[in-house]
Image: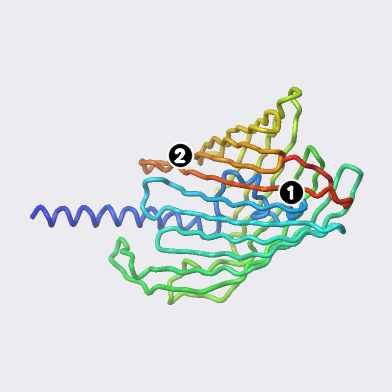
Amino acid sequence: MVKEIGYKMKKKIRLLHLSVLFISLQSYTQQAPHYTQYLYNMQIINPAFVGYRAELSMSVLSRQQWIGVKGAPITRTFSINGRTRRGLGIGATIIHDKIGLSETTNINLDASYTVITSRYSRLSFGLKGGLNFFNNNLFSGITPDNDSYASTTGRFVNVGFGGLFYTPKFYVGLSVPQLFESPQFYIEDNLKPVSFAKNTNVFISSGVLFKLTEDVLFRPSTMVRYTANLPLSIDVNTNFLYKDIIETGISYRYKNSVSGLFTLILNKKYRIGYAYDHRFSILGGNLSSHEIIFQMDLNFKQNTRWLLSNHCYF
């Protein structure tokens, strides 16, 4: 009798986990992977940032969300980009995302072209294209109604674009990183051919640099994400940089989460960062997240149409 009660309790807990993840997936399907330190990985969101920072820029990011929730999202990202002497930027990204019973690997190529608008300002346009591979092990899951579904695998194309205007102390960008709908979370009987997404993500980002003292810089920034049929997402970030070596900051996502970050910058080229997120939730439990990033920016001081900068400001 006790074993039977225990089995029923475990089953209910498992159903609760899957129900929470199912609710999350409904919004997650049309979302780009969630990041806190996206300021240093903007290539993922806006291809116009390719080549913006340095002749060669590479980053590795690892993020684990909702600590304590079984099947919560885990994201691993690698990105690389560079630029030529004639204003052409080229890059690539690989994103491995796992949430619940579903895994996705996104491989994208990015390109940008930069136009000189004045001595201290530039205008960049970017394109993104690639393939997304997914594997849904739905057969191993249990739904609240005890339904079972066949596992699905497949791939679909991705196309996106973006624009960016920037100076050494200011930037503003607009991007749509994914134009096509993802069929990833459809069950086998409802798989559809690739079509334009109904809930396309539109990102607007901006940041500015203020010099408070000889040693301290203040870098406020914001990102607004508009998606049809979903609440508007607004991020406000406040970062302080001390002697180009240590950076700390707080980020607030409206009615969603608050985050803290700490970064160590070595020789103005190498960045090691950590971020902690606390998510506001009515479900209870620990929905915090951890994120680490390593980034390398190398400038070879070539005479190009790009703004020359050896700093990890944006």
Residue depicted at 21% across the width and 52% down the height: 9
Quadrant of the frame with the N terminus = bottom left
The type of residue carrying mark 1 is: Leu
From the top left corner, tell me how far across and down residue 8 is, in percent.
19, 56
Residue that extends furthest to the right in the rendered view of this protein? 119
Distance in Å between CA atoms under marks 2 and 1: 38 Å
Q: Nearer the viewer, residue 235 or 260?
A: 260
From the top left corner, tell me how far across and down residue 250 is, in percent.
58, 33
Q: Is residue 165 left or right of residue 44?
A: right
For label 2, the residue is: 280
Q: Hey, which quadrant is residue 92 in on the image?
A: bottom right
User: Which label is found at residue 224?
Assistant: none
- Sequence-wise, which precedes: disc 2 or disc 1? 2
Disc 2 on helix, strand or loop? loop
In this view, 156 is above or below 117: below
For label 1, the residue is: 298
